[in-house]
Amino acid sequence: MRVVIVSDSHGRNDYVKRAIQQAGAFDVFIHLGDIEADLEELKGMVDCPSYIVAGNNDVGTGLPGTLTITLEGKKIFLTHGHRHGVNYDLKRLGLLAVYNNIDIAMFGHTHYPYLDRGDDVILLNPGSLTYPRQEGKARTFMIMELTPEGGVEFYWQELEEEGRRKQSWLDKLFEAP
């Protein structure tokens, strides 16, 4: 099963659409909040099960603050993270996940891509499609692949710039002076 995970698109459904196109075929779509755009337009972009939670900027959308889903036997907790203190540390979210027998806890809000494959729980943040904060400021999302046998793999994706390939930090190392 192939899952596309995005967060913090902040009104830029065009970036979400580009991420969906770049991802290729997938089975499930997850948005971890701060949509700030036309929710129906967003839902119409995918023809598969989609799970969307509200971010701190999605007041009045009627979206749930959290969701717990099961995919290929993995119990997955979805949250934007602002109510779990993810800007300060991940202990609270990690403890909540362990206490509730969660296998994977996904969050957004910080705009930093993050993946920790802990012994008890996997914590992940796909980063932001609109306002990335990590070094290099790449617009990121994630692809998760789950197998029926319980395997799980994660692949970071940088949103490709329209009309040209984005130059990476590695390319800059080999530029002529």
Image (tube, rainbow, N blue to C red):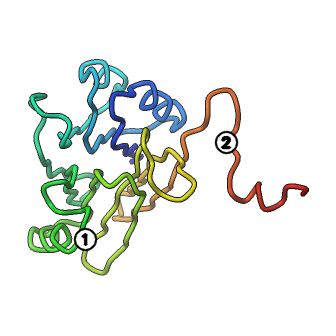
Q: How crowded is mark 2: few (under 14 residues within 10 Å), some or many (20 or more)?
A: few
Q: Is residue 107 above or below residue 27?
A: below
Q: Residue furthest front?
A: 177
Q: Which residue lies furthest to the right in this view?
A: 176
In terms of secondary structure, where does tag 1 sit?
loop
| Mark 2 residue type | Lys
Image x and y of residue 76, in percent: 22, 57
Residue name at image x 39 percent, y 57 percent: 147
The one of 68 and 138 positioned closer to us in this rendering:
138
Image x and y of residue 164, in percent: 70, 32
> Where does label 1 land, which residue?
89
Task: Tell which circle, 1 or 2, labels the residue nearer the N-terminal end.
Answer: 1
For residue 166, the mark is 2
**Which quarter of the figure is the C terminus placed in?**
bottom right
Residue name at image x 26 percent, y 38 percent: 34
The one of 138 and 123 positioned closer to us in this rendering:
138
Image x and y of residue 30, in percent: 30, 42
Q: Residues within 10 Å of mark 1 (few under 14, many from 20)?
A: few
